[in-house]
Image: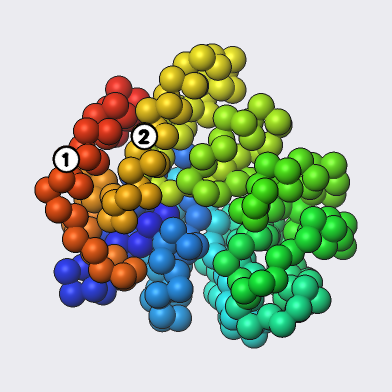
Amino acid sequence: MATPFTEANEVDYEDLAREVDFLVRCGVHGMVWPQLASEYPRLSKQERMRGMEVLAKAAQSKRPALVLGVQGPNVAAAMEYLKHAEQLGCDALIAIPPSEAKSPDDYHHYYAMLAGATSKPLFIQTTGGAREITPSVEMLAKLAREFPNLGHVKEEVQPVIERMQELARHRPAVRSLFSGGGGRGMIYEMRLGMDGTMPGAPYSDVYVAVWDAWQSGKKEKAREIFAALQLMLNVEQFVPRARMYIMKKRGVFKTTVSRYPKSVMGQAAIEEVEFHYAALKPYLRT
């Protein structure tokens, strides 16, 4: 999920709740917040706590699973978020590695402490933590064996496909394997029997269309839809505000405000986004 902001650069909780309804209409299986695509490093503790509360209320009785991000720079900080998420009754948790870690052993301790404090499924995201520390496949498999609720991985470390294949050899201890990275390897991953992807929110119904076509055996159709989606994912690399622009265009957010380094979408950039977005229109559900 993306995080909406007002023109005054405050979190727009009304739009955050509206995003849930948008994703429900898109047909997604789950909603994840706050992660890197949510600009979580630029959210305060108070904003994260309140955002969790808003989403728990908005997602109540809705079909998609609600997965709340409980990462923190260290165990103590992450544990506060985890306890709050537990009280709100989410379906699962996800945690980016700790930024204050000094070694892989610190990663292991962090996830072991979190897993021991909950019975809910807890996804390990493999990127976004301390620089120059990469969780090994062996460590992830060991954690999955030690804590069954830790057998869920969102793999984003390169080479992603190869690491996912290695992790798959540790099934059934490793229970589910998801990717990130905008879902750019989605079809390849489905061909290999992976369990899903956690892309950004703006084109959620298109990802669903790819998934549904592939799972129903319409692989050529899935490829056709995915090809149009890739055009937008490519544009995002050149137009930093493209995601927020689309969220506003689709009536989910009121603004395109972001807390990442400021950039202005000029007319040429807007025309480029609109040109490629037109290819997605046949596949939009909402």
Circles 2 and 1: CB atoms closer than 8 Å: no
Q: Is residue 45 left or right of residue 281?
A: right
Vertical placement of residue 150 versus 77, above or below: above
Point 42% across, 62% down: residue: 38
Point 66% across, 47% down: residue: 160
- Occupied quadrant, residue 24: top left
Q: Element at badge 2? A: helix
Assign the N terminus to one quadrant of the image: bottom left
Assign the C terminus to one quadrant of the image: top left
Q: Position of residue 151 (x, y in %)?
A: 76, 53
Label 2 CA crowd tier, 10 Å (few <14, some 14–19, many 20+)? some
Q: Which residue is mark 1?
A: 271
Vertical placement of residue 26 versus 141, above or below: above
Vertical placement of residue 223 versus 76, above or below: above
Q: Is residue 185 left or right of residue 247?
A: right
Q: Which residue is mark 2?
A: 231
Q: Amino acid at mark 1?
A: Glu
- Which residue, as the protein is rendered here, is positioned at the far left? 267
Point 73% across, 43% down: residue: 162
Vertical placement of residue 270 versus 80, above or below: above
- Occupied quadrant, residue 131: bottom right
Q: Amino acid at mark 2?
A: Leu
The answer to whether any part of residue 86 appears in the image is no
Q: Element at badge 1? A: helix
Q: Is residue 89 left or right of residue 42?
A: right
Q: CA distance from mark 2 to mark 1?
A: 14 Å
Q: Position of residue 52 (x, y in %)?
A: 45, 67
Point 22% across, 58% down: residue: 256
Q: Position of residue 208 (x, y in %)?
A: 46, 32
In this rendered view, identify the residue nearer to me: 147 or 8.
Answer: 8
The answer to whether any part of residue 47 appears in the image is yes
